[in-house]
Amino acid sequence: MRPFHGLSAFPITPTDPDGTLCRADLRAILRRTADAQVDSICVLGSTGGYAYLDPGQRRAVAEETVAQIGGQVPVIVGVGALRTDTAVSLARHAQDSGANALLVAPISYTPLTGDEVLAHYAAIAEASDLPICIYNNPTTTHFTFTADLLVRLAAIPTIRAVKMPLPTDGDVAGEIADLRACLPRGFSVGYSADWGCRGAMLAGADAFYSVAAGTWPAEMLRLVRAAQSGDAAESARIDAAFQPMWDLFRKVGSFRVVHRAATLLGLTEAQPPRPILPLQGQDDALRRAMDALAAV
């Protein structure tokens, strides 16, 4: 299994207002995603609302996910936490549950230094044999990884991938070349922010970590496969069908959009965790965006 290559789908975590997992709904979401034959599924990423769940609730998600799709699709479990000991405990549990890999974000309240982040990741790596993907998402974590810190982290044997934000200058190919020049051979360089999927994969990214793939896995897989094969025209056609969805993602936030979409698709009645409010006033636009995907 290669959990850090190709399309990684990030599903929502359906919960009741108290944060208790809606197990049947999660199973339906996971089965739909796995049946599309995505390359991996990552639960408890940002789309999975990990920051709004307590450790016990997160363990329930990991266990349910492995029980449902383990062995069919590589399972990545997000174990980012404010405290290192919590992240270490979640990493051990993910391995014991049968997960295939970990996604680690450097959650912080007090701004972290590079040395603190290095020590945090080293402790998690020591606690588990699972391969780790660095979650570089400064928008949500308020920490930006420098190239130097990535090099230091990549020296830890089980740290084998990074999930990058789209570069502000738009030069994905240049950034990939720069990273590959300093990181170990075979270290996976992937990206997120779905509207950049086509460009990132055409530029040679190893993986794409997708919010939309957790809800529209078959459609996103077609986009990724077309771009992976270098088919600029076909990937442009599919990306154009997704543009209304990308517009909504950027306007109101993908987290709100996919929660509402899951309800419209009949996958769950679960609402986003408070204080996030359900999407309001966008149903017509969302339905049009979903209808546009029929062209994919």
Image (tube, helix red, strand yellow):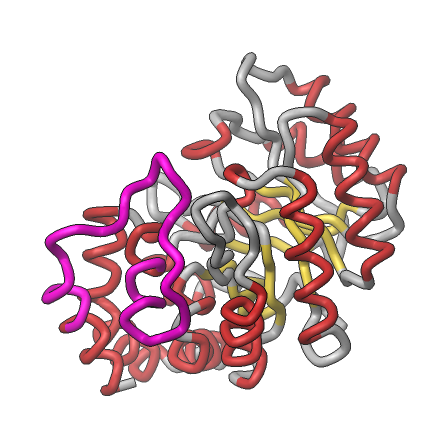
Q: Is residue 15 above or below residue 289?
A: above
Residue 169 pos. (x, y %): 33, 41
Q: Is residue 171 above or below residue 100?
A: above
Q: Quadrant of residue 123?
A: top right
Residue 241 pos. (x, y %): 22, 76
The residue sitting at the top extreme is 110
Q: Residue 289 vs residue 49: left or right?
A: left
Q: Residue 235 vs residue 62: left or right?
A: left
Residue 14 pos. (x, y %): 48, 58
Q: Is residue 123 above or below residue 191?
A: above
Which quarter shows the C terminus?
bottom left
Q: Residue at x 68, y 75 (%)?
A: 69
Q: Is residue 39 visible?
A: yes
Q: Residue at x 56, y 72 (%)?
A: 30
Which quarter shows the N terminus?
bottom right
Depth check: 192 or 78 in front?
78
Q: Is residue 181 visible?
A: no
Depth check: 15 or 249 in front?
15
Q: Quadrant of residue 35?
A: bottom right
Residue 128 pos. (x, y %): 87, 46
Q: Residue at x 46, y 61 (%)?
A: 210
Depth check: 179 or 129 in front?
129
Main SS of the magenta part reads loop
Q: Residue 193 vs residue 97: left or right?
A: left
Q: Is residue 169 magenta?
A: no
Q: Residue at x 88, y 39 (%)?
A: 127
Q: Is residue 282 magenta?
A: yes
Magenta-colored span: 259-287
